[in-house]
Image (spheres, rainbow, N blue to C red):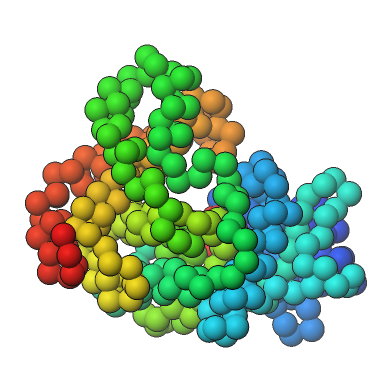
Amino acid sequence: MADSARPVSQDARRASLAWFPRCEIRPLGAGFINDTFLIENHERRYVLQRINGSVFPDPHMAMSQTIRVVDHIAAKQPGWVPTLVPDLAGEFLHEDTGGEVWRLWDYVEGTETRQFLRGAAALRSAAQSFARFQNLLIDLPGPRFEDPIPGFMQLGHYLEDLAEMAPDEPWMRFVASRDALSELFNERTGYIHGDCKVNNLLYHVGGDEVAAVVDLDTVMYGHWVWDFGDLVRSAAGEAGAFSLDRYEVLLEGFSRETRRAPTVDELVLGPRYVTLMLGVRLLTDHLMGDRYFKVDSAGDNLRRAETQFRLLESMEKAETGMRERVKRYSAQD
Ligand SMILES: Nc1ncnc2c1ncn2[C@@H]1O[C@H](COP(=O)(O)OP(=O)(O)OP(=O)(O)O)[C@@H](O)[C@H]1O
Ligand SMILES: [Mg+2]
């Protein structure tokens, strides 16, 4: 969705000149990481993005990996990821005079982004789509990716940072009593999306089917359950509490599509691993002065961390129910 109330920076206008002598430009979406703009030029629409250099320490490396993902998936399933558009110099990446890095995508017409999925059909498609995304990358050729963000998705790394910085933090007991989760899911099983939130899916307008997957810079060689866990964390909640029914739909969609052979423990504990990790990252960012996650007012990241910790508790309480539902869908224990 375009948001004409927000101003468009001069930087974005200048960057657009690398592709078009003139065009219309508006902010787009609700992304927290990159700056995203909708561009209109001669009846066609595009998406201009500045890659956030404080999140991705090496935007050139991240972008070269993103190009490999796009090329590979587009060859196997055309349209499943958007197409990158070269600038007037023929480059996919434009670096401005301030060292900021920009790129342009084709806008995927006839689609919409949702922040929350109501019906089971749309929720099931989300899980199937992220599983399919992993499937499509199983045979990605070439050297294995570097982690686009150092330590990304590694709970142990984030726990160490927090313990070092704030050993007396009141949430530390809650966190430390669950640190055994960091022993799990450390092996790398294949390429994953790395940011499995439903607003990274483009749905056919008014429909339940996904047309394309976006936000590809976090694709990494990791554990498949980091994706499933993040999807459950972000999409299985309803009114702040974990919903077993929504979990079951996600489980069903993912299990139907994935070419992995998930175990019961992976499907039950994976969401807890990712939820604790995000809570710890938010708490750490709050203590460090909100450097990573944007805030509207001081304390936002502490409140977001508390929400994750409460969600984690409700997943713990739902463990028996989760195990029962997994057993209906998974092949092995
Ligand atoms: N090619 C595209 N066609 C249509 N809409 C798009 C396209 N690319 C991005 N969008 C829209 O812009 C939004 C933000 O894009 P994207 O997810 O890449 O940014 P981000 O800042 O990295 O997001 P996040 O907050 O997930 O980190 C998407 O949720 C989607 O609504
Ligand atoms: Mg996004």
Which of the pair 61/79 is nearer the observer?
Answer: 61
Q: Is residue 160 above or below residue 90?
A: above
User: Would residue 206 be found to the left or right of residue 329 on screen?
Assistant: right
Regarding ligand 1, which quadrant of the image does it lie in? bottom right
Q: Residue 93 location, x and y as percent?
A: 78, 62
What residue appears at the point 33 percent right and 76 percent down from the top-left corner? 257
Please state, as top left, top right, bottom left or bottom right, where the C terminus lies in the image.
bottom left
Q: Quadrant of residue 14?
A: bottom right
What residue appears at the point 62 percent right and 61 percent down from the top-left corner? 143
Q: Is residue 102 among the parts visible in the rendering?
A: yes
Please state, as top left, top right, bottom left or bottom right, where the N terminus lies in the image.
bottom right
What residue appears at the point 59 percent right and 70 percent down from the top-left corner? 141
Q: Is residue 1 among the parts visible in the rendering?
A: no
Q: Residue 162 location, x and y as percent?
A: 44, 26
User: Would residue 1 be found to the left or right of residue 179 on screen?
Assistant: right
Q: Quadrant of residue 63?
A: bottom right
Q: Quadrant of residue 19?
A: bottom right
What residue appears at the point 85 percent right and 53 percent down from the top-left corner? 96
Q: Residue 164 location, x and y as percent?
A: 46, 19
Q: Is residue 186 above or below residue 119?
A: above
* Image mark count: 0
Which of the pair 330/144 is nearer the observer?
Answer: 144
